[in-house]
Image (cartoon, rainbow, N blue to C red):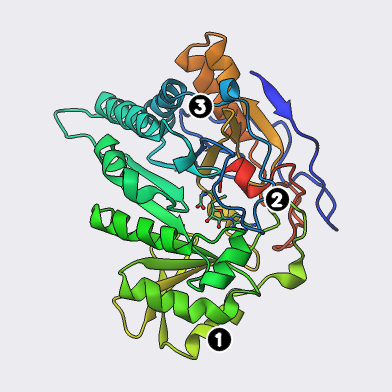
């Protein structure tokens, strides 16, 4: 196995101490289990670090260093890893992200390769003439240019799209993303709805500068039939400016939204879902809040991540990566790749990149990569 250590994460203000015995043996299961009893079934695949926006909480103004083209996973490599993940490791949800997935000209081929591999993987598992379950393939996108490609993406096998949009105020959007492209984003969302990708989910990062416009964003989402979810800002900005004091909490948001809408707690879609939901004006529209900082949900984390370079990350905040692309290119078998993936996930940290049991809910290991470089 090729393990790439990007440095031992230090946790701000918290001692590092393992919460489980270091030598605990891995149970004999093909699934992606970890030392804390979690099972990863949700695969996030970053396919580029390039992006058409420069959101201040994610990217530096000049953009992230581009991964050299021959270091990016190819559609064939992505298809092979998806096939191993679905058939051998229990993956059931796949989401492409970045960077911006639409920056890849071969995105249609990537989705097509993933769809074919996922369908073949499920067909191989179907027994006794039962029709195989469909693995969901989704994408997280800023929707710029989506209107021109959405039909081809759906034809290739895309099931869902989550669009990131923090405000419907044109000036605030231009300041936050360093690009005056709000209208193009809205065009992309409308195209996704027209292409039948409903429900389109909108993800908004909660920021002090957009809090006042949160109710306008919710009104737009309700009017267009989109499911809006706010997420607390995490320390994953490339500029390292995040401070705990600037985090707008779910409680702050609910107070602002409550001035315009009647919000009724609706719980969670399922117990492991990170978003807590509220009915808007008695429904059916809902708004969700992902309190990733003030109420961490690491205990229910079921994610495994592949970076654009083809390394596995078990945790957003962990710096340990295992290079699966190197294994593929060295001629490793599916079994060897699956074993390396399982070993990487077994080492998944308890929470926020650390095994420390004393970890405060809002403490995070310092990660060497920003959200755009990991794939959110
Ligand atoms: N370009 C795509 C997009 O805009 O959705 C995919 C990549 S983007 C990194 C994925 C998600 O990460 C977006 O919803 C973005 O808002 C979120 N994100 C980026 N930086 C974040 C941060 N510091 N805290 C919380 N979410 C963040």
Q: Nearer the viewer, residue 312 or 163?
A: 163
Q: Is residue 323 left or right of residue 134?
A: right
Label 3: which secondary element: loop
Of the image marks 1 and 3, the number of the one nearer the N terminus = 3
Of the image marks 2 and 3, the number of the one nearer the N terminus = 3
Quadrant of the image containing the N terminus: top right
In the rendered structure, find residue 60 and report the number of the disc placed on it. 2
In the rendered structure, find residue 28 and report the number of the disc placed on it. 3
Of the image marks 1 and 2, the number of the one nearer the N terminus = 2
Label 2: which secondary element: loop
Which quarter of the picture shows residue 179?
bottom right
Which residue is the extreme one toward the front?
A: 180
Asked if the residue at tag 3 contacts the one at tag 1, i.e. Cβ–Cβ closer than 8 Å, the answer is no
Q: Is residue 172 left or right of residue 39?
A: right
x, y percent for residue 186: 39, 62
Query: Which residue appears at 58% of the width and 35% of the height?
Result: 307
Query: Which residue appears at 51% of the width and 27% of the height?
Result: 28
């Amino acid at each position: 196995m090729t393990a790439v250590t990007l440095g031992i994460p230090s946790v701000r203000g918290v001692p590092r101490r393992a919460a489980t015995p270091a030598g605990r043996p891995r149970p004999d299961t093909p699934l992606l289990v970890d030392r804390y009893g979690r099972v990863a079934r949700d695969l996030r695949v970053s396919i580029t670090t390039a992006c058409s926006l420069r959101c201040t909480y994610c990217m530096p103004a000049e953009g992230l260093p581009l991964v050299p083209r021959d270091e990016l996973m190819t559609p064939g490599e992505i298809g092979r890893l998806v096939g191993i993940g679905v058939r051998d490791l229990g993956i059931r949800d796949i989401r492409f992200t970045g960077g911006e997935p639409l920056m890849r000209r071969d995105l249609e081929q990537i989705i097509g390769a993933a769809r074919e591999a996922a369908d073949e993987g499920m067909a191989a598992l179907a027994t006794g003439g039962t029709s195989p379950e469909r693995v969901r393939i989704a994408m997280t996108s800023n929707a710029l240019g989506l209107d021109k490609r959405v039909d081809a993406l759906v034809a290739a096998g895309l099931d869902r799209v989550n669009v990131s949009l923090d405000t419907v105020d044109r000036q605030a959007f231009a300041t936050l993303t360093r690009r005056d492209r709000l209208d193009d984003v809205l065009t992309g969302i409308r195209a996704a709805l027209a292409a039948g990708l409903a429900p389109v989910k909108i993800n908004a990062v909660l920021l002090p500068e957009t809090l006042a416009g949160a109710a306008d964003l919710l009104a737009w989402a309700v009017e267009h039939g989109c499911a809006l979810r706010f997420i607390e800002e995490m320390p994953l900005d490339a500029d390292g400016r995040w401070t705990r004091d600037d985090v707008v909490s779910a409680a702050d948001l609910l107070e602002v939204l409550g001035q315009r809408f009647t919000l009724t707690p609706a719980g969670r879609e399922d117990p492991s879902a990170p978003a807590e939901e509220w009915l808007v004006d008695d429904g059916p529209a809902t708004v969700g809040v992902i309190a990733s900082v003030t109420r961490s949900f690491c205990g229910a984390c079921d994610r495994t991540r592949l970076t654009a370079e083809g390394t596995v990350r078990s945790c957003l905040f962990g710096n340990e990566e295992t290079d699966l692309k190197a294994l593929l290119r060295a001629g490793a078998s599916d079994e060897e790749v699956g074993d390396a993936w399982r070993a990487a996930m077994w080492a998944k940290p308890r929470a926020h990149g650390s095994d420390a049991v004393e970890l405060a809910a809002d403490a995070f290991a310092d990660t060497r990569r920003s959200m755009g470089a990991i794939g959110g």
